[in-house]
Every structure is written in structure tokens, then in C-alpha cells.
Image (tube, rainbow, N blue to C red):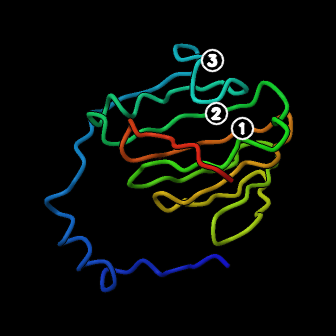
Amino acid sequence: MAQYCENTHENTQGREDAMADKKIHSDFMVNRTKDNPFVSGGLRVYREYRDLGIGEATGGKVHAHIIRTTKPCPEGGSGMHYHDVDFQMVMVLKGRSRVWFEGQGEVEFEEGDCWIQPPGIKHNVLYYSEDYELLELTLPENYKTVQVEG
């Protein structure tokens, strides 16, 4: 079940004070589709990636890219794996998917859905539609993906 909170000054002030010295510097930037096409050669051979330039603008502290599928989901899915990140958020821009998460089981997603994967959570992308496209945001920009026994 999704958790919701009301963002008010009272319930965020302590967090803001604690984070004041950890702010991420970012340069102004604009990323245009025509100048930054999708490219293959990323983590998965059945996907293409469009880097949004946020890594460069934040000195590698934040990464954002759009991922789209180019081939059907492999039999058995992506394989059980986890990402060694500080933060990861995913939003479905097009299509549908089904992902198994450690401690959660299978979860289905459709266009407009968004989720956060805690650092190190094991997961396996079991299914995605042929038009599947997503936005992924991670901290930091560069991190390890570790395949594990299922």
C-alpha cells in the first residue's frame, strides 16, 4: 500500500536542517530529444537508453534516463539482481510491466505508476509490454548492478 504524507513546514523542517550541508549542486541545463537520442549498449541488450544529462549537471551525484524496450522480455525475466544505489525511483511512461521484489512479491505496473526501490532490494523484471518505456532516477550516477542466484 502506498504511503502518503502531507508536506508542511512543521514536518519537514528537521529534515531540511539535517540536509542543509548535503545539498546537491546542479548547473543549469536543458536536454533536448533531438540532440540526445536513444542508444544501445547499456545494462540490458534488449533496451535503449536516453541519458537526460543530469549526471553531468550534478557532478555525478544524480542520474536520470529514459529506458525503452527493443526486444521481448527474456524468458525468466531480467534475472534476479539488485542495484548498489543510495536512491532509485522508477516511473512508467508507456506500457505495462510485472516485477518481483524481495519482501513484496509480484507487483504490476502501468503507465503513470511510480515506485521507489530501496537500496539493495533484489528484484526480477518478469514481464513488460512491447511499448514499455520508463524514467529512472538514481543517486549516484554510477553504481553497480549485481546479478544474484534466484
Question: Would you name the residue on which mark 2 appears?
Answer: 67
Q: Quadrant of residue 72?
A: top right
Say which residue label 1 marks. Answer: 133
Q: In which quarter of the image is residue 112?
A: bottom right
Give amino acid for label 1.
Glu
The residue type indicated by label 3 comes to: Ser
Q: Give the image location of residue 111, x and y in percent.
A: 77, 51
Give the residue displayed 69% in from the left and 53% down from the top: 150
Q: Residue furthest left?
A: 21
What residue is rendered at 31% in x and 78% in y? 12
- Quick one: which residue is furthest to the bottom in this view? 10
Please state the horizontal and vertical placement of residue 68, each as a whole percent of the image.
70, 31
Give yes or no for contact between labels 2 and 3 (Cβ–Cβ under 8 Å): no
Q: Mark 3 points at which residue?
A: 40
The residue lying at 58 percent from left, 14 percent from top is: 34
Mark 3, Cα crowd under 10 Å, few <14 / some 14-19 / many 20+, is some
Q: Do the residues labelled 1 and 2 touch (CB within 8 Å)?
A: yes
Q: Which residue lies furthest to the front in this view?
A: 149
Q: Is residue 107 left or right of residue 15?
A: right
Task: Establish if 9 lies above or below 127.
Answer: below
Q: Nearer the viewer, residue 71 or 131?
A: 71
Specify whether 59 is left or right of 123: left
Instruction: Give the number of marks.
Output: 3
Q: Which of 46 and 129 is in front in this view?
A: 46
